[in-house]
Structures are given as C-alpha cells and as structure tokens.
Amino acid sequence: MRLIVTLDDYGGMLFNRRRQSRDRVLTEDILRTVGEGRLVVSPYTAPLFPSCTALTVAEDPLAVAGKGDFCFLEERSPRGQMHLFSTVVIYRWNRHYPADVFFDADLTEFSLIEAEELEGFSHKIITKEVYQRL
Amino acid sequence: MKHSSILQRTGIWLLLLALCLTLSGCFSIAVPGQSGMTPPTEADTDPVDTDPVGTEPVETDPSSPDFVLTELPVYTGRAYEVLNNNIPVFAPEELTVEGYEFYSPLDALGRCGTVIASVGRETMPAEGEDRGNISSVKPTGWVQASYDSMGGQPLYNRAHLIGWQLTAENANERNLVTGTRYLNVQGMLPFENMIADYVKETGNHVAYRVTPIFEGDNLVCSGVQMEAWSVEDDGEGVCFNVYCFNVQPGIIINYATGASSDGGEIPVDPDAETNADGEVIRDYVLNIGRMRFHYPNCSSVGQMSDKNKQEYTGSREDLIDQGYQPCGSCNP
C-alpha cells in the first residue's frame, strides 16, 4: 500500500476538521502519481477528485486499500500503521497553517528516494517527497 | 474598499460597538446576543454542515449564538487558543458573496477597533501587485526594541489586522496595530494563509472579522480575536474562532505603554520531557555555520546545506550557552 499526505511547515495536516490547504496542481499531480492504479480516499477527500473514475471511497481507507493501492489520508495521522506502507508520498505546502492534527508517524524505516518541486496554483512551491521502505 | 448596504449596516453597528467599548473601558467583545447579530443560519440549524469530516460529533455549543468573550485565555505556550469550539459568530447580512471591507475608526486613544471583510478574489492584491510601505503609520504603543534572544530582530511589527494578502491594505492606520513578531508570524499568519489559499483555489468568499483586545486604556492590545466562515459552502472550507496572543516568548511587555524588557518566562508544555535542571528537552536542527537553531520543521532547515546541518536533542538553554541563537522565523 502507498500513502499520500500533505503537510505544512510544522507537520500539520488538519485544523478544526478541515484541510489546511488545497491546490489544484497538487490534486492533478496525485492523479498522475496514481496513474492506472487505484486511489482510496475518505468521503471527506473524495470531492477533490470529481473526475477520477478509479476512486474508491471508504470511511476507513486503510482498511479497504490493498497492496499497490494509493491511500490519500487527510484527516488523521497514520501513526502506528506505517507497517502497512511500502511507499510514502509527502507533499509539503511550504507554508504555515493552524493545525490540531499532525503527522507524527515514524519514517525511520523509510528512505527518501525522490524529491521535486511543483509550482502550485495557489502556492509558490510545493515540495513532493517520495520515501520507500528500506 | 467597496461600499454597500451591508457595509453601512455593519459600519453603524461597529461604530456603536466602538462607542460602547470606549465608554466601558473594557475588552468585552460584542457578539450576537448583544448586537442583534446571529450566527450563520446553516450552522445553527444543520450542525452536520460544520463537520465536513463527518466522523465525530459536532462540538457546536447550542448556546453559541450568545457567546461573549468575557475572559481572556491565558498564554500557556501556544500562539493561539480556540474560542467557542471554533464556531465564529456572524450576522446573516455579514455572510455575503460580495467582497467588502470595513475598518473601524480609531478610538479616543488612537487605537484600532474591529475590522471585518468578506474576503474574495476581488479584495485580494492584483497579480504582481507589490506590498506598499507602511512605515509612516505609528500604531499606539509603538515603542520599538530589539533583543539578542530574538536574534537581534525588532520586537514589534506593524501588524495588519486583516493581512495584506487578503485585502491589499497598506498604510491604513485603522488596520495596523503594534504586534509582536510572534503574534504576526506564529499567531495570525497561519490563519490568513488558510483563508488566502481557500479563496484563491475556490473563488469563494470568507467572512472574516478581527478584533484587537485592549484591556482598559492599554495602548498595546493583549491579543486579537479572529473569526472566519466560508460563505458559499457554509463553513465547510474555512471555519474558526480563535484568540491569538500578542506576546513574545522571553520578553516582558508593558501593555499600557508598549515598553518592553528582556527576561519574560517562556511557558512550556507541562508534559514535556525535562532535564535535571528542569529545562525542556526537545529536538532541534542546528546550523553550525551560522550558529542558529531551528525547530525541525522550520522552512529554513530545507535551505540549509548538509555540511552545516546537525540534529540536536537537548534544551534551548544549553544551545544558547553554546553560543547558538534561535531562528527569527520559527522562534524556537
């Protein structure tokens, strides 16, 4: 299973049950990253991908996704479940937002294998990092 | 600034509010129960709309329409505290899909009052527009100082109540208060960023009110209340009600005058790990070339060369003893 998350400068994910930010360039890049694969998201995340035909919507995406699937997790940290993932894709907003849910999972068993910068629509630079299990 | 009937109604209400505050000499925040305003209708009648995630019970307090900030939160080391379960309070006529801005007149002491806007693309800076010079404005309590503990940076900013990125206001004396760098960067900016991104991406509007809280005749505000509600999607995109502290960790501020001195206590998380001296232990990233230390997630860390970067776990005090200075951006 492959994990996708978006983080601010302090590892924040969510504030008051709402995403910290969004960017159409990022959602397009997620679809490119998923390619022919399956993207599993929660009902909250699903409206970000109105044109995605390979979208699977589940209350608990991690319980539904299989090997090779992508899970875009917005609403909670995957702490304690990192063993499920072979790859972690982190998009960094390079901005600071309020947060009450943070990405506090352990990445020590993963290695950064790729990093690139995307010019966003509402963000100057979004950094995309790909980590692979060691 | 756009003029409309809603602006006029809001303006009249705010003028009355400013008069009340001046006469009362206190910081009471007037909200619906006192002003005739009501909260967003949908939030009141359909609480599911305030819970886009849908996984937890909505925290909406049924009494929220009468919410009044009567007691200021106590600073405990967080740049802001949530008010009223994060539910803002706006009158229906303030929730408009037409952009507008209103800035209260200065009071008898020359202090700013409540500012309110419906932030939309039309109120934001035009593409390529540069921020103007605001140094001509001297907000009340403007007694500038700089401290080694802040890396020599100035204590105060001319803090926009409504951030420039939202309404492109430059040297508007009704929109600038004496605010610490901490208030500006750690307190207010993250919320402004959230609104700005949302508006840029969706083209929707956000009802946004910022109220500086002055205690008595103080010339420097103790903090600001920030309320926001995204209009077109009934708060699904943006919804908050917070109080940001006008403090600077390690600095004592005389709010009556704006004077300041070194040595303020820095509140810490009571659950944090400490060393034998009672100093808080946490992770930092050092720039051993520039002798600065940062929080691991500080944006400056990514710009650091590998040869200068070093991870460190220990106390802030130890680092300062070793000659390191805290980063002026993340304020570790």
Image (spheres, helix red, strand yellow):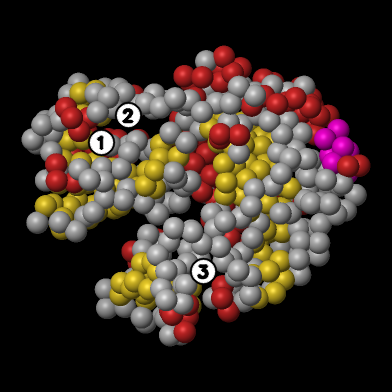
Q: Residues within 10 Å of mark 3 (few under 14, many from 20)?
A: some
Spatial CA distance of label 3 from label 1 is: 34 Å
| Residue that badge 2 annotates | A45
Image height check: is B160 above or below B33?
below
Amino acid carrying label 3: it is: Gly
Extreme bottom residue here?
A: B322
Q: Judge left or right: residue B57 versus residue B307.
A: right
Which residue matches tag 1? A72
State the image quarter where residue A49 is shown: top left
Label annotation for residue B100:
none
Report whether residue B171 is seen: no
Q: Secondary structure at mark 1?
A: strand
Q: Which amino acid type is marked by label 2? A: Thr
Residue located 85% across and 41% down the image: B21
Chain ID at mark 2: A
Q: With A10 as the anchor, is A116 left or right in this view?
A: left
Disc 2 + disc 1, Cβ < 8 Å: yes
**Magenta residues?**
B15-22
- Assign a secondary structure to mark 3: loop
Q: Looking at the picture, does residue B275 appear above or below residue B84?
A: below
Question: Which disc, if any, is residue B328?
Answer: 3
On the question of residue A72 being in view, the answer is yes
The mark nearer the N terminus, 2 or 1, is 2
Task: Measuring from the top left, give residue B86's x and y in whole percent.
Answer: 56, 35
Residue B221: give x, y in percent of width and height.
74, 54
- Quadrant in the picture for the N terminus of chain B: top right
Position of A112 relative to B88 (above/below)? below
Question: Do callouts 3 and 1 mark residues in contact (Cβ within 8 Å)?
Answer: no
